[in-house]
Amino acid sequence: MSTGLRGLKSGTDVRGRALGEGAPLTGAAVSRIGAAFVQWLKERGVDNPRIALGRDSRVTGEALLEACAEGCMKAGALVETYGMCTTPAMYMSLITEGFGCDGSIMVTASHHPYDRNGLKFFTKEGGIDSRDLDAILDIAESDLPLLGGSSPIVKRDFLPVYCEQLKDRVRAGLDTDVQKPLLGLHVLVDAGNGAGGFYADLLEDLGAWVEGSQFLEPDGMFPNHIPNPENPDAMASVSAAVVKAGADLGVIFDTDCDRAAIVDRTGREINRNRLIALISAVLLDKQPGLTIVTDSVTSSGLAQFIMEWGGEHYRYKRGYRNVIDEAKRLNEAGFNCPLAIETSGHAAMRENHFLDDGMYLVTVLICEAMRLKQEGKELTDLIADLREPVESSEIRLDIEAEDFRAAGKAAIEKVMDHAAFAPGWHIAPDNREGVRINFDLDGEMNNGWFLLRLSVHDPVLPLNIESDVKGGVKYMAKALLSVLEGSEGIALDKLKTFIGQQ
């Protein structure tokens, strides 16, 4: 049979509209995909699979979790459900004594609007990759045998165990066994009505003051702001709340807590390059010589910062699975690489199984904030020397050609060919995705750059552009326009509009 389930694939996740007429992510769809996950595990040699399921706060989460659990059970699995949970916790449950299922599924659509939902999958080896999901969806769209399993679905509570694991990390990070090691630190938590509101209680149990924390109650309609550390309204909200409460810092999570950002006591956002710089400084302060893996759009100022702290900055392809897998590969090749992090806030640390866990990242930073406060310092003192760009922008160029990948690749190759001979254009030595060009502006060297790459899923060429001098972004955009004009299938109207606005 063909159910069109492959259209729900988004990278390594299943994702789609789950509310409204014609919504493709139905209970029947997730039931079948859950059953296919069980069958996929059996084909990998797992007899009598045990499956754990959790969900975030979305309005469709409870019903979809129940449907997915039913599908897993009918495919012959023993099923446990954990109710409201976080995505990282659903992986940790697989490797925690006393739980230890063979696979887990998180019902979530991350930071997407309330009417979306999806599925994320884990085995004990970590998150599945794109090819694994292809195989699962192939099974789901086949004549999948349902064995009519009848084992009862068991409800368990894993979140308190995960909380204890984070508390243990705080005490280990501060080298203490006292019950309230965070006494004297004021941390404001903004959960955006997602799954992470419990973190305020966790911090309070450790002695922190959490006065002013907001939007802790789960509400799948997200009535206050989208739970997304990259959303300007969300960041403005937590920043204002921190200043009003006089907190030492604020933390904000996305809906399922695999991404996070912080703000300092002045309300300044510490996300994107600043967040990468901050956790890099924390790690390099303890052990110089580390390699930090990031995605491709990080700034030249960040690269300089990591180098000055004694580290090696390694840019790789966008996509959190890409940076995590590359960090693992580098470690296997003999590099000392403790961190894989995207500018979006996805961060995975070697000490935490290279699990993409925003809450764990924030916990590490809170430990450092506490240590520094005891010395009369602030967390953001660590990034005082981070050079910020004078100008930076992102423009998304639409690809109108039917074969958008071929058209996008042709445009990138055209830019690459031009850069090989153009004065002042330098192909970046760490160019691992699309084409990254460094520029010499105003008589200086390498003080501007752009990165033109092909989107993973969409018919779009994202252009990230950054300059250390005023007017540099417009100069580079015009230079790129002159190269791209005449490129078949590439819409340049947004680039022209951007130039006209500068």
Image: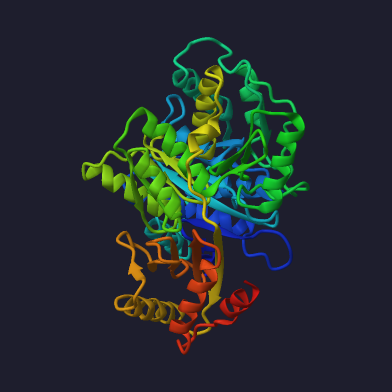
Quadrant location of the C terminus in the rendered image: bottom right
In the rendered view, does 55 fall on the left or right side of 37?
Answer: right
Tally of numbered tags: 0
**Residue in view at x 67 percent, y 33 percent:** 189
Residue 41 visible somewhere in the drawing: no
Quadrant in which residue 179 is drawn: top right
Q: Identify the residue at image location x=56%, y=45%.
A: 271
Is 454 drawn above or below residue 83 in the view shown?
below
- Please tell me in which quadrant of the rendered image residue 377 appears: top right
* Residue 174 x/y as whole percent: 47, 18
Residue farthest left in this picture: 334
Instruction: Name the residue located 36 percent from the left edge and 71 percent from the top edge.
Output: 425
- Residue 336 image offset from top left, x and y in percent: 28, 38
Instruction: Indicate whether 185 appears above or below 195.
Output: above
Question: Residue 436 at x, y = what percent?
Answer: 39, 66
Determine whether, in the image, residue 120 is placed left or right of residue 217: left
Q: Residue at x 43, y 64 (%)?
A: 138
Above or below: residue 265 compared with residue 10:
above
In this view, the residue in front, 201 or 312, is: 312
